[in-house]
Structures are given as structure tokens and as C-alpha cells.
Amino acid sequence: MPASGDVAFSVTGVRSSFIVDDDARASCVVNCEYGEPEPDRSPIVAESSTLWELRRRASGEDEITFYAPIGDERVAWSQLVIDDRFRRARLIQRYRWGGRPTLCVGYPVDEVLMCRLLMSEGVLVVHAATVEYDGMALMFAGHSGAGKSTIAAI
């Protein structure tokens, strides 16, 4: 429930397999708030060109800062800080991103959380395309835009 009446909160497109009873214990609790995402001074561990940066804070928390291109600049619009045991996370977003006061817990934040949840359960997450050919499974792994779907279609 939003703390302020001028904030919209909605969940859409949820598959029934992801809906659990109200008394189920959450794997990770995400606190959402408005603010100015400020990257920590710790070194960048991984990055995706100009769209996001991953840092490991001295406290052991992982920090993912998401950016959007504005003209020749890039602006931090959202930041996710996850504790080292994946029990708590904090999502900080600019208040009026896109002209409306809505916290966006969709892509890419939901993808990061889901991948972390799966990995904490021992599941290997691979960004790939697969195809069955002559009784074999062929997997093409790579980053977005690398041509995985194209080569699978060929």
C-alpha cells in the first residue's frame, strides 16, 4: 500500500503460478522509495555500456544503478541495493520519471530480482536461445543483441 495518496501502485500481467497465499514468507523484501539515485564510490564490478552499473559496496551489498540517456548525458533514474544474503533490497527511483509519480518495479528491476532469487536457490541463469536439431539441443548464449535468436532461426 503506498504511503502517499498521489502514488499509484499496480501489479499487472502476473501469472497465477507466482501468486502465493498471504501468509507465505517472502524470500526478499523490497522497500521502494523516491529519491535521487546516487552511485556509491566503490569500483564498478560490471556494466552494460551506458544503461546500468553494478557495484559491490564495502558492506557487502550489491548496488545496481540504472541510467537513461538524456541528450548527450545519462541520468541515474533508478537504483536497487540488495543485501549480501538476498533477504532485503531497497529500490530508489526519481519521483517524476516520465512525468508521473509512479514507482516502476517492472523491467529491468524485476528481471534482476528474479535472476537473484533463482541463483540463491542454486539455479543457473543463462541468457540464451535454444533449438532442437536432429535429436540434440543446441544453445546459443550471449548478451542482448548478440544474434542468438537469429542464429537459432537459421
Image: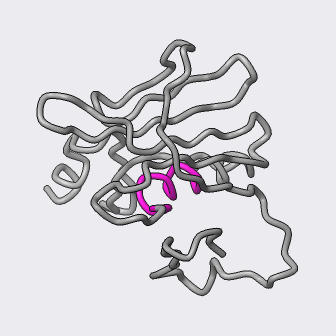
* Quadrant of the rendering where the C terminus is positioned: bottom left
Task: Tell me where the magenta segment starts and ends, as one range.
Answer: 104-114
Can you tell which quarter of the image residue 136 is in?
bottom left
Q: Position of residue 66 (x, y in %)?
A: 40, 40
Asked if residue 151 lies left or right of residue 43, the reply is: left
Q: Where is 7 relative to 136, above or below? A: below
Q: In which quarter of the view is residue 55 placed?
A: top right
Callout count: 0
Image coordinates for residue 87, horizontal then vertical, percent = 79, 48
Query: Looking at the image, which is closer to me, 47 or 40?
Result: 40
Whether residue 108 is in magenta: the answer is yes
Estimate the x, y position of residue 149 in percent, counting from the top left. 23, 55
**Left or right placement of residue 20 versus residue 6 in this view:** right
Which residue: 55% across, 76% down? 5
Q: Residue at x 38, y 36 (%)?
A: 76
Instruction: Identify the residue at horizontal 63%, vertical 82% (top origin).
Output: 17
Check if residue 43 falls in the magenta segment.
Answer: no
Please give left or right for residue 129 compared with residue 17 in the image: left
Q: Is residue 12 above or below residue 143?
A: below
Residue 69 higher or lower than 151, as above or below: above
